[in-house]
Amino acid sequence: QVVLQESGPGLVKPSQTLSLTCTVSGGSITTNYYYWSWIRQPPGKGLEWIGYIAYSGYTYYSPSLKSRTSISRDTSKNQFTLQLSSVTPEDTAVYYCARVNGWMDYWGKGTLVTVSS
């Protein structure tokens, strides 16, 4: 059973960098051919895909967020991390991490991040 758990600050000030970590258990983030994604859902809106880091370490981001997004990993801790810079209140959302195996088959429970001064 693969379990993903998001962690990080629940409150970030405008213009700062949002940083979240996803800790994975029950499977390695370097296993072929899984991809590890970040997704968010603003209040009252639909899901928005942010980007992924592949088993190989390759990253790919949503074009709309690419200029502000970085996804990295720590294979020794089996974790991957999202950094979103220059945040505004519009970045307030529940942030999820998920495993992609053709589809997003395992999800974390999500963590609410509020951007406010």
Image: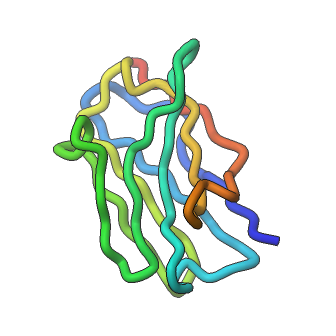
> Is residue 23 depicted above or below 64 in this figure?
below
The residue located at (29%, 52%) in the rendering is: 61
> Is residue 3 depicted above or below 6 in this figure?
below
The residue located at (61%, 54%) in the rendering is: 104
Identity of the residue furthest to the top in this view: 44
Identity of the residue furthest to the left in this view: 67
Residue 85, percent from left and from top? 26, 41
Query: How many discs mark residues in the rendered view?
Result: 0
Question: Which quadrant of the structure image shows residue 55?
Answer: bottom left
Identity of the residue furthest to the right in this view: 1
> Is residue 7 depicted above or below 56 in this figure?
above
- Viewport quadrant of the C terminus: top left
72 left or right, relative to 47: left
Residue 89, percent from left and from top? 37, 18
- Viewport quadrant of the N terminus: bottom right
The residue located at (31%, 73%) in the rendering is: 58
Residue 21, percent from left and from top? 52, 58
Q: What's the coloring here?
A: rainbow
Residue 82, percent from left and from top? 41, 54
Question: Which quadrant of the structure image shows residue 4?
Answer: bottom right
> Is residue 21 depicted above or below 33 in this figure?
above
Q: Nearer the viewer, residue 37 or 115?
A: 37
